[in-house]
């Protein structure tokens, strides 16, 4: 069985949209400003993009507000470029569009409930999948309720995140929400998941360049207390070595 090339699938979708002269409405789930920097730089040329900042997995209140503030600052910078038609040093041109943002409800209890029973699972395993399911299902519901055509996530830009799992979870979220709409359990229109693997074609490298350019706050852990504890253990081990 051939492994899916999610980046190529995204490129094919974009080619299809451009051929038909359409600019779909896209809800982009975003985990933080650094990860979204390249995603937004790229996507704003082909989609009408709205950021969805929904991350109850960021379990420290101060950390959450720092990350969402940085996301809003980055969007302001990108929108200023569009207003001034100045894309110097950017991989964007006059086709770039302004970006909106929706901030989801911040309630870490949702996260702890979603991963209950998985607390001792190592990073990158089943607990992380439960977290992805929580956030992408909420993204899909928000997209359907607000007349978006597509949704996706910036999480695939991380070398530490499994693009196969994320795309699978995203497609499952779209199916779940569309079934709720068909059963009249949710008002809205059907939604599609946009495949992605934003780390490809030096996407992750570009996100680091953009983070430096805009002086973005770059955290060294995913967001939950479990990932922070794991990162602290790794740093302690590095010091001993």
Image (cartoon, rainbow, N blue to C red):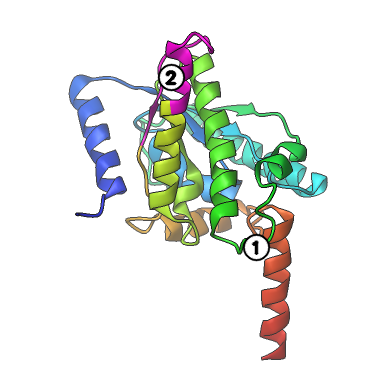
Q: Is residue 174 left or right of residue 119?
A: left
* Residue farthest along the bottom direction in this orientation: 241
User: From mark 1 to mark 2, how far is it between C-alphas?
Assistant: 38 Å
Residue 179 circle label: 2
The residues colored magenta run 176-194
**In percent of the image, x 63 and y 35: which residue is there?**
54
- Neighbour tally class for label 1: few under 14, some 14-19, many 20 plus, Cα within 10 Å: few
119 displayed left or right of 198: right
- Would you place residue 158 above or below residue 140 in this image? below
Q: Residue at x 75, y 40 (%)?
A: 108
The reply to whether residue 16 is visible in this rendering is yes
For this rendering, which residue is in front, 44 or 88? 44
Residue 89 visible, this orientation: no
Q: Where's residue 82, x and y in %?
A: 47, 30
Q: Picture coordinates of residue 177 (x, y %)?
A: 47, 23
The residue that disc 1 covers is 220
Q: Residue at x 43, y 28 (%)?
A: 174
Sequence-first disc among 1 and 2: 2
Name the residue located 48 percent from the left edge and 54 percent from the top edge: 207
For label 2, the SS is helix
Closest to the camera, between mark 1 and mark 2, is 2
Image x and y of residue 11, in percent? 26, 40
């Amino acid at each position: 069985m051939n492994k899916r090339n999610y980046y190529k699938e995204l490129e094919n979708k974009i080619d299809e949209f451009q051929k038909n002269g359409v600019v779909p409405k896209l809800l982009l789930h975003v985990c933080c400003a650094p990860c979204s920097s390249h995603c937004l730089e790229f996507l704003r040329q082909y989609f009408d993009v709205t950021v969805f900042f929904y991350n109850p997995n960021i379990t420290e209140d101060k950390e959450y507000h720092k990350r969402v503030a940085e996301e809003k600052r980055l969007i302001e910078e990108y929108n200023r470029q569009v207003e001034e038609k100045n894309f110097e040093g950017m991989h964007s041109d006059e086709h770039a569009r302004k970006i909106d943002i929706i901030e989801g409800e911040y309630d870490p209890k949702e996260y702890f409930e979603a991963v209950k029973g998985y607390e001792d699972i190592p990073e990158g395993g089943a607990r992380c999948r439960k977290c992805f399911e929580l956030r992408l299902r909420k993204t899909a519901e928000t997209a359907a309720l607000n007349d978006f055509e597509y949704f996706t996530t910036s999480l695939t830009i991380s070398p530490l995140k499994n693009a196969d799992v994320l795309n699978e979870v995203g497609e499952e979220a779209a199916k779940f929400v569309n079934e709720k709409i068909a059963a009249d359990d949710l008002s809205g229109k059907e939604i599609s998941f946009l495949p992605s693997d934003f780390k490809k074609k030096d996407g992750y490298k570009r996100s680091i360049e953009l983070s430096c350019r805009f002086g973005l706050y770059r955290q060294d852990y995913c967001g939950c207390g479990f990932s922070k504890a794991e990162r602290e253990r790794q740093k302690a081990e590095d010091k001993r070595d």
